[in-house]
Amino acid sequence: MAEEKHQHHHHLFHHKNKEDEGGPVDYEEEVKHHSHLEKIGELGAVAAGAFALHEKHKAKKDPENAHKHKIEEEIAAVAAVGAGGFAFHEHHQKKDAKKEKKEVEGGHHHY
């Protein structure tokens, strides 16, 4: 085929990079963006972890529905791990953005 098919991926927290449009990249904005998403991931991990503990407590207090509470506890625990992984990923994205910013500004030279 003469026509190329372009795949468009839609991501929840994806933003267009100015460099893709031919303009300069605002590295300070990149750092802020990844820092913000890192905090969201951390909050998600804490919230899901708290909910998992809550469900664990409910399982002990409500033996009749203990199985349901244990399942919800496990799901919340998985969500906490996923949110923690997302926070970890964004932390590294933030570090990379800081490194790029420093390189562009003519930062530290290692000898």
Image: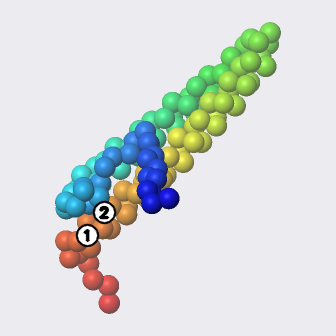
Amino acid at pointer 2: Lys
Mark 1 Cα shell of 10 Å, populated few (<14), some (14-19), many (≥20): few
**Image: 9 above or below 62:** below
- Residue at the image position 46 percent from the left and 53 percent from the top: 5
Is residue 14 among what the camera can see?
Answer: yes
Mark 2 Cα shell of 10 Å, populated few (<14), some (14-19), many (≥20): some
**Image: 10 above or below 64:** below
Q: Find residue 4 and report its horizontal and vertical position in percent.
A: 44, 57
- Residue at the image position 26 percent from the left and 78 percent from the top: 108
Residue 49 appears left or right of 31: right
Q: Which residue is mark 2?
A: 98
**CB atoms at circles 2 and 1 under 8 Å apart?**
yes
Residue 67 appears left or right of 25: right
Is residue 35 among what the camera can see?
Answer: no
**Image: 56 above or below 62:** below
- Residue at the image position 38 percent from the left and 45 percent from the top: 14
Quarter of the image where one finds residue 22? bottom left
- Residue at the image position 32 percent from the left and 85 percent from the top: 110
Amino acid at pointer 1: Lys
Q: Find residue 66 and report its horizontal and vertical position in percent.
A: 77, 17
Q: Which residue is mark 1?
A: 102
Q: Find residue 29 and report its horizontal and vertical position in percent.
A: 24, 52
- Identify the disc placed on residue 92: none
State the quadrant of the C terminus. bottom left
Quarter of the image where one finds residue 69? top right
